[in-house]
């Protein structure tokens, strides 16, 4: 689907806390996934998509596929930014391109994440509600 209306990437700030790091003060690899997840959730929230309302309708989003490139470690107290764009929008899936950058805009981690829309009770793919598609196409983060 056409994503022409999305001209600006969505940006979400992240501060690295002690709990995010390993014994050496470097962000533990699985925590990058949490940073990416939070940014995707906040992107949806920014266009008016409520996860709670979706859950009430038995609609959920699940990660179907992810490619991730750990480029350089982030450290305790780093002020980072997660930059998210939607590269593909289909009836029942979204593909996000995400990167975590430091204040110098140097990429520390990049990911391509394909998320499927599912019926939470049947655990089967389901077409996204048209309202979500409209918000994602028409909104400019």
Image (cartoon, helix red, strand yellow):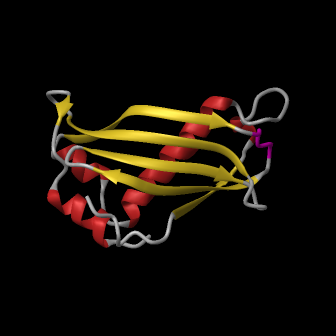
Query: Dividing the picture into quarters, in which one does residue 60 lie?
Result: top left
At a point 41% along the width and 31% down the height, the residue shown is 65
Position of 8 with respect to 16 (left or right) is left
Percent from the top left, x then y, of residue 79?
A: 74, 56
Percent from the top left, x then y, of residue 59?
A: 21, 42
Percent from the top left, x then y, of residue 28?
A: 70, 31
At a point 45% along the width and 40% down the height, the residue shown is 113
Q: Which residues are magenta?
A: 72-76
Work out whether residue 81 or residue 7 is closer to the camera in this orientation and state it: 7
Quarter of the image with the C terminus in it: bottom left
At a point 28% along the width and 63% down the height, the residue shown is 2
Percent from the top left, x then y, of residue 139?
A: 34, 72
In the displayed structure, would residue 46 be above or below residue 25? below
Magenta stretch: helix, strand or loop mostly: loop
In the displayed structure, would residue 98 be above or below residue 7? above
- Give yes or no for residue 21 being in the magenta stretch: no
Position of 112 with respect to 58 (left or right) is right
Position of 95 with respect to 99 (left or right) is left
Quarter of the image with the N terminus in it: bottom left
Position of 83 with respect to 123 (left or right) is right
Residue at the right extreme?
Answer: 24
Work out whether residue 81 or residue 110 is closer to the camera in this orientation and state it: 110
Query: Dividing the picture into quarters, in which one does residue 129 lie?
Result: bottom left
Count the marks: 0
At a point 23% along the width and 59% down the height, the residue shown is 133
In the displayed structure, would residue 119 be above or below residue 12? above
Work out whether residue 90 or residue 43 is closer to the camera in this orientation and state it: 90
């Amino acid at each position: 689907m056409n994503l022409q209306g999305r001209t600006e990437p969505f940006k979400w700030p992240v501060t690295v806390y002690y709990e995010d790091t390993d014994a050496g003060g470097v962000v533990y690899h699985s925590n990058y996934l949490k940073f990416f997840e939070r940014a995707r959730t906040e992107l949806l929230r920014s266009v008016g998509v409520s996860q709670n309302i979706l859950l009430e309708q038995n609609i959920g989003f699940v990660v179907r596929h992810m490619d991730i490139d750990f480029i350089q470690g982030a450290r305790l107290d780093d002020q980072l930014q997660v930059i998210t764009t939607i590269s593909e929008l289909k009836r029942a899936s979204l593909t996000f391109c995400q990167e975590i950058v430091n204040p110098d805009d140097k990429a520390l981690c990049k990911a391509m994440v394909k998320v499927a829309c599912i019926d939470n009770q049947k655990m089967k793919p389901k077409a996204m509600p048209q309202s979500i598609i409209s918000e994602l196409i028409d909104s400019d983060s």
